Image (cartoon, rainbow, N blue to C red):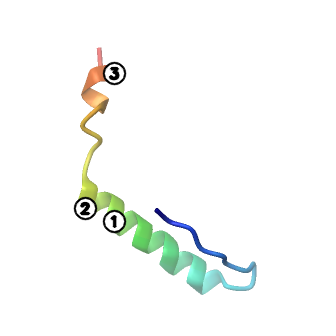
Amino acid sequence: MWFRFISASEGKRFAETVQEMVNELKKLGPNPLRRRWDI
């Protein structure tokens, strides 16, 4: 779960946080439940 307080003046921290989130999501891979919704 991701929850961070980031001030509007912390652009670098925001970018780093987003990059961390993207990396973690890529590790998880595609959602296995998605196949149930494809027709």
How many residues crowd mark 2 within 10 Å: few (<14), some (14–19), many (20+)?
Answer: few
Which amino acid type is shown beneath numbered disc 3?
Trp
Query: What is the spatial separation of the Cα atoms under label 2 and label 1, in whole angstroms?
Result: 5 Å
**Looking at the image, do the residues carrying marks 3 and 2 touch, with CB atoms under 8 Å apart?**
no
Residue located farthest toward the top when viewing the structure as drawn: 39
Q: Secondary structure at mark 2?
A: helix
- The residue at which mark 3 appears reads as 37
Q: Which disc, if any, is residue 14?
A: none
Sequence-earlier tag: 3 or 1: 1
Left or right: 21 with respect to 25? right
- The residue at which mark 2 appears reads as 27
Q: Secondary structure at mark 3?
A: helix
Which amino acid type is shown beneath numbered disc 1?
Glu
- The residue at which mark 1 appears reads as 24
Residue 21 vs 37, above or below: the answer is below
Query: What percent of the width, then of the height, locates residue 34?
Result: 31, 31
Query: What is the spatial separation of the Cα atoms under label 3 and label 2, in whole angstroms?
Result: 22 Å
Query: Which residue does the image show at 34% across and 68% down from the upper left?
Result: 23
Left or right: 27 with respect to 23? left
The total of numbered circles placed on residues is 3
Query: Which residue does the image show at 56% across and 68% down from the upper left?
Result: 3
Residue 2 vs 39, above or below: the answer is below
**Quadrant containing the C terminus in the rendered view:** top left
Residue 34 vs 11, above or below: the answer is above
Query: What percent of the width, then of the height, locates residue 25?
Result: 34, 59
Sequence-earlier tag: 3 or 2: 2
**Looking at the image, do the residues carrying marks 2 and 1 touch, with CB atoms under 8 Å apart?**
yes
How many residues crowd mark 1 within 10 Å: few (<14), some (14–19), many (20+)?
Answer: few
Query: What percent of the width, then of the height, locates residue 30?
Result: 27, 45
Query: What percent of the width, then of the height, locates residue 11?
Result: 65, 82
Query: What is the spatial separation of the Cα atoms under label 3 and label 1, in whole angstroms?
Result: 24 Å
Which amino acid type is shown beneath numbered disc 2?
Lys
